[in-house]
Image (cartoon, rainbow, N blue to C red):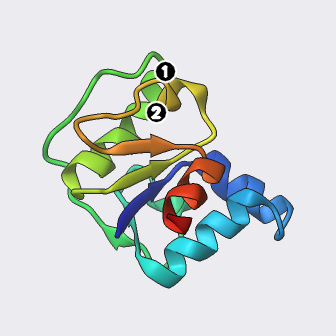
């Protein structure tokens, strides 16, 4: 499973280790791989896979969030996990699910 995690999820997880975002991050660590790009790598875990962004997008109503979609698209992600409404409204993006941490965990739980 290949997953892009939005910055706000990492921040929420860092603030409370027992939160839903923290549990979602733990689930990716156990069952998948994080994807990142040069634009997002300062905020990602060391265990992330660096994705070269060759296809750009300009679709999000907040243009600063397009970088997460670019990583997802170029990294062939299965999911983008975000608490950002600007990204969540785009679900799905080119057949990539964009889910809140809680919805992501529900999918993993089956």
Quarter of the figure that contains the N terminus: bottom left
**In the structure shown, which secondary structural element does the residue marked by tag 1 occupy?**
loop
Cβ atoms under marks 2 and 1 closer than 8 Å: yes
Nearest the eye: 98 or 41: 98
Q: Which mark is residue 62?
A: 1
Extreme residue toward the left, this view: 54
Residue 41: x %, y % from top left = 45, 61
Q: Which mark is residue 65?
A: 2
The residue positioned 69% from the left and 68% from the top of the image is 23
In the displayed structure image, the side of residue 25 where residue 53 appears, left or right:
left
Q: Where 101 falls versus 30 (above or below)?
A: above
In the displayed structure image, the side of residue 63 where residue 76 appears, left or right:
left
Residue 84: quadrant of the picture: top right
Q: Where 84 falls versus 101 (above or below)?
A: above
Q: Count neighbours of disc 2 (C-alpha within 10 A) and say few if under 14, some if 14 to 19, many if 20 or more.
A: some
**In the structure shown, which secondary structural element does the residue marked by tag 2 occupy?**
helix
In the displayed structure image, the side of residue 67 where residue 88 appears, left or right:
right
């Amino acid at each position: 499973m290949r997953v892009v995690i939005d910055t706000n999820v990492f921040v929420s997880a860092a603030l409370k280790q027992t939160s839903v975002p923290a549990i979602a991050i733990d689930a990716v660590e156990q069952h998948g791989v994080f994807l990142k790009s040069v634009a997002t790598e300062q905020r990602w875990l060391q265990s992330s896979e660096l994705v070269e962004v060759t296809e750009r997008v300009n679709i999000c109503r907040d243009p600063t969030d397009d970088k997460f979609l670019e990583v997802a698209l170029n990294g062939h992600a299965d999911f983008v996990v975000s608490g950002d409404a600007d990204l969540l409204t785009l679900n799905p993006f080119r057949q990539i699910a964009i889910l809140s941490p809680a919805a992501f965990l529900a999918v993993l739980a089956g």
